[in-house]
Amino acid sequence: MKKAIALLLGVALCLPVAATAQQPVKKRPNFVILLADDWGFSDVGAFGGEMATPNLDALAANGVRFSNFHVAGSCSPTRAMLQTGVINHRAGLGNMPETIPPEHLGRPGYETHLNNRVVTIGDLLRAQGYRTYLTGKWHLGHTPDTLPTARGYDRALALSQSGADNFENKPNLLLYDRADWTEDGKPAHLPERFYSSTLIVDRMIGYIDGGRASGKPFLASINFLANHIPVQASDADIAAYKGRYDAGWTALREARRAGAIAKGVMPAGVHMVTMGTTKDWSAITPKEREQRAGAMAVYAAMATAMDREVGRLIAHLKASGEYENTVFVFLSDNGAEATDPMEMTWMSRWNARFLYDQSIAQQGRPGSLTAIGAGFASAASSPLRGYKFTANEGGLRVPLILAWPGNPAFQKNRVAGTFAHVTDIVPTLLALAGAPPQEGHFAGRTVEPVIGSDLTPALRDPAAAVHDPDRPFGYELSGNAVLFKGDYKLVKNLPPYGDGRWRLYDIVRDPGETTDLSGQEQARYAAMQADYAAFAKANGVLPMPEGYTAPKQIFENAFHTLLVPRLLAAAPYLAGIAALFAALIMWVRRRRKAGAQA
């Protein structure tokens, strides 16, 4: 009986309470979503990393860390699921605009923007009386009807693309011709010089303060560019990590593994493997080691700069009296980024050198295009296999911290090992707001229902499971595919990340995916393949064209998006130059002929 009473009290503490003559209304919580870009599983100090992230570590100490939490292998599919609670193939992001093959573009589920069959957490909470704000990377549409203020947000400073420069209003010149920043659906007026993490938090603080007089709770969706390419930070932050990574990625993998075990987010004795695409540190030249260690120092500096901005936001909420009644959600959109323009095609290398200062001394500074590459990306996700784009745990398993500092029913400084997924965030926030679940209807129309589960049981008891272990959970992006079921994971990766063959792992006992169980567990292997086939059919997953690889498609799409229009725009000038050159040749020939006749 006592346990039942305690459970009821715990539930009551997590939900708004109706007013009575004797009892005042309990204020609904604010929500702050802190979305990092391309952070590996063990990047945060509370997950075993060496980088300075004191403010995120403090949130972890005030909440629950989820050690078995999964997203998509790349940016916008994760963001679509985070915003809607719906699988990416039903939300319109079956693939990204940067990686989609032309054959798939526009097919159902492959619109490459949030479609009209889904509603966002902004829509849902605004309907419940919340103020709704978004700043930073959106990457879910760039037309007026697909920008944040058309999808549930009252105010928004949004970047519609995968990334941009962090110091000025300039795009990643290898992918885009301009940085598409908008504010409230119109072209944004950015300062001449800024730093992206500071800008994003500044604008959010302004939005929150501007609406405080309404008395309404708020949703603040803060979407950092850190640590997406180009990796950039201030000279002072970079200097703080000088020499820190000189021992290389092999040593860092081992240190991160030990750190993750010590923090309780990985089991003791966890085995660790790395991707075959990474070289051994000792096999590269001293100059390469200097460049790579320097790039990783910039990566760490960028993370620390982002963490400092998180701390500034928290300090502001404390000063305004909002901190205790705010639910914080921190996660990354996928694992660390392994792509490096300097290790891709000759054209990418030439463009990077032509458009940017790629000297070692300039790494991370304005005018540079810095990337950590596959070696350090693998280490950033240690002890997991893989990184961004892959369907291995290093691509899909990322840190998640949920904290409500002022709620005594929420556990503090605990680790939840239960399987969790990015589609769980929407139903969790709705439950904490005391709002009804979204079950396929909104504002009088039929929409895609939320498929995620409410994580609040794990916030009260980190040992609680939130997903039915017998329920299969599928995923696919760019041909890399997964079927989760209980403790097991069926996975395949297309080249260059794998050989296209299905493998089976127990990701609870073997999160590093070191032992393929497909031969030992043949019945389970076959059953999970059938489950995946059913998922793919039900969700309209399209087979990839023959020879498809995501890196190659990025290059081809950028080629058609950038180079072809530039050539067409230059065609009249090129034609004029050709005509002048032809006229010059004709004149020279006539002069020679006249001279010969004389």
Image (spheres, rainbow, N blue to C red):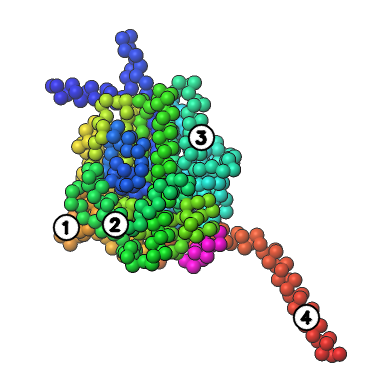
**Which-is-in-front pick, marks 2 and 1?**
2
Residue 351: percent from the left, percent from the top? Answer: 53, 62
Q: CA distance from mark 4 to mark 2?
A: 67 Å
Marker disc for residue 203: 3
Side of 127 relative to 255 (left or right): right
Question: Which quadrant would residue 23 be assigned to in this image?
Answer: top left
Direction left: furthest residue: 1
Instruction: Label 1, secondary structure: give it.
Output: loop
Marker disc for residue 588: 4
Residue 259: percent from the left, percent from the top? Answer: 26, 47
Amino acid bearing label 3:
Arg
Q: Residue at x 24, y 39 (%)?
A: 416
Q: CA distance from mark 3 to mark 4?
A: 63 Å
Taking the magenta stretch, the answer to whether it contains residue 349 is yes
Q: Residue at x 49, y 64 (%)?
A: 349
Amino acid bearing label 2:
Ala
- From the image, tell me which residue sits under label 1: 521
Marker disc for residue 571: none
